[in-house]
Image (cartoon, grey):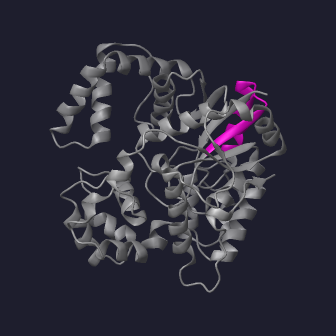
């Protein structure tokens, strides 16, 4: 059996994702699709709108055969480490290839870009440092260095200003750096851009557009046409039970409390928190009535919105710099769900999988896995606060979903 891997968040799973799966399977000539999916907190430093088990159901209904979890250590990391963790897991579970959506849509420019940066790494790093000294943000400094190199060594390269191209580049970089035989493939994004708002009458929309539409109205029908039926039904079921979707706006009272209860000297111990911002975080938390008003007070040229959100995520979950620096690669494969074909694949190739395959975690000695369980409970508690019943599944008690 031939497997193609995809790296996903499915926040939520929409028609564009269904198209990507269909094309990935076709281009890879694969029998099954394996998705490595972020858990309850995501790469841009925000809580997933619904929990990982609900998103696993959406994925299996949409055509994924095996869903495994990208550990929190990597799912909330900058693009380089996010990609490294994801490709490491897809390679370990036995994927022959991985397919990612991109604005470019052709693999050759990605390989050219990797060779350009890899062959001129010292010059590239020096250009980044040169740009950072002017006070420009890290992402803009990366782009500056890339532009300078690509002009000096002309060829067909990708546009690294596009979000999916950036992630695609890091997936390829991870595969090459790991020395994996896993083959990279790319599928062109169609219809909606990464940040595009929901368009009336459209059948495909970005996940960002869908979340924004749901944040502005509690009317689920507004996103009906851009979601597969199973995704829509799962979102409706979630909303019926929890009366809200998770976001920093809904978690704001708890995040505000978390920030205020810390002293300025305590905050720098958390992952990605840069010394010098701690006073600003606490001061803004004391005077903000919402997450958006808080962010407007602390954002600056030095800190991107995403970088700030990742800091806040780690403060919220209690994830420290010490913990972050103690991990280099995933130490297990956490199975979240599987189809009948996925189960057959695991049965056939289980002995070839190079990491422990975890399906039940009633107790664990694995520190990385313990962090995943902890942050899932933090997420669940934030959702259920103020309700009389605990409706979300306990993470450590939940078996893989069979579809």
What residue do we see at 55% from left, 34% from top?
Answer: 87
Residue 226 in the figure: left or right of residue 76? right
143, 372: nearer the viewer: 372
Q: Is residue 363 above or below residue 290?
A: above
Residue drawn at (62%, 77%) of the image: 243
Q: Name the dominant secondary structure of the magenta segment.
A: helix
Quadrant containing the N terminus is top right
Residue 375 on image: x %, y %: 50, 62
Question: With respect to residue 355, does 281 lie above or below?
Answer: below
Q: Provide residue 225's location: percent of width, then percent of height.
A: 71, 56
**Magenta span covers which residues?**
16-36
Q: Nearer the viewer, residue 304 or 373?
A: 373
Residue nearest the observer in this picture, 24 or 180? 180
Q: Is residue 374 left or right of residue 52?
A: left
Classify 13 as above or below 131: below
- Residue 227 appears in view: no
Count of all numbered marks drawn on residues in the image: 0
45 inside magenta stretch: no
Quadrant position of residue 328: top left
Residue 34 belongs to the span the image colors magenta: yes
x%, y% of residue 298?
26, 63
Q: Position of residue 304 (x, y in %)?
A: 32, 51
């Amino acid at each position: 059996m031939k497997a193609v891997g995809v790296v996903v968040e499915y926040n939520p799973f929409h028609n564009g994702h269904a198209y990507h799966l269909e094309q990935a399977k076709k281009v890879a000539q694969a029998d099954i699709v394996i998705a490595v999916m972020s858990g309850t907190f995501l790469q841009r430093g925000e809580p997933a709108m619904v929990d990982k088990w609900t998103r696993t159901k959406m994925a299996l209904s949409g055509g994924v055969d095996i869903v495994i979890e990208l550990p929190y250590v990597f799912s909330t990391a900058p693009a380089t480490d996010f990609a490294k963790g994801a490709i490491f897991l897809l390679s370990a579970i036995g994927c022959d290839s991985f397919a990612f959506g991109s604005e470019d849509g052709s693999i050759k420019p990605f390989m050219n870009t990797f060779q350009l940066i890899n062959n001129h790494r010292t010059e590239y790093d020096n250009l980044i440092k040169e740009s950072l000294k002017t006070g420009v943000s890290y992402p803009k400094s990366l782009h500056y260095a890339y532009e300078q190199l690509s002009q000096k060594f002309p060829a067909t390269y990708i546009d690294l200003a596009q979000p999916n191209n950036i992630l695609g580049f890091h997936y390829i970089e991870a595969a090459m750096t790991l020395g994996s035989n896993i083959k990279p493939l790319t599928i062109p994004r169609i219809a909606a851009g990464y940040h595009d708002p929901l368009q009336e009458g459209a059948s495909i929309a970005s996940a960002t557009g869908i979340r924004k539409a749901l944040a502005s109205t509690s009317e689920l029908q507004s996103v009906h046409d851009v979601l597969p039926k199973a995704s829509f039904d799962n979102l409706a079921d979630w909303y019926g039970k929890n009366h809200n979707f998770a976001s920093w706006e809904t978690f704001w009272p708890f995040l505000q409390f978390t920030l205020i209860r810390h002293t300025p000297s305590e905050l720098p111990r958390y992952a990605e928190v840069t010394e010098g911002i701690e006073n600003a975080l606490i001061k803004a938390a004391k005077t903000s009535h919402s997450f958006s008003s808080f962010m407007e007070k602390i954002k600056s040229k030095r800190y991107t919105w995403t970088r700030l959100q990742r800091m806040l995520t780690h403060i919220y979950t209690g994830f420290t710099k010490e913990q972050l620096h103690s991990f280099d690669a995933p130490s297990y494969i956490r199975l979240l769900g599987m189809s009948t074909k996925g189960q057959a694949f695991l049965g056939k190739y289980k002995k070839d999988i190079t990491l422990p395959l975890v399906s039940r975690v009633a107790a664990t000695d694995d520190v990385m896995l313990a962090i995943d369980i902890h942050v899932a409970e933090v997420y669940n508690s934030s959702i259920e606060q103020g309700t009389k019943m605990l409706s979300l599944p306990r993470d450590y008690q939940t078996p893989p979903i069979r579809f």
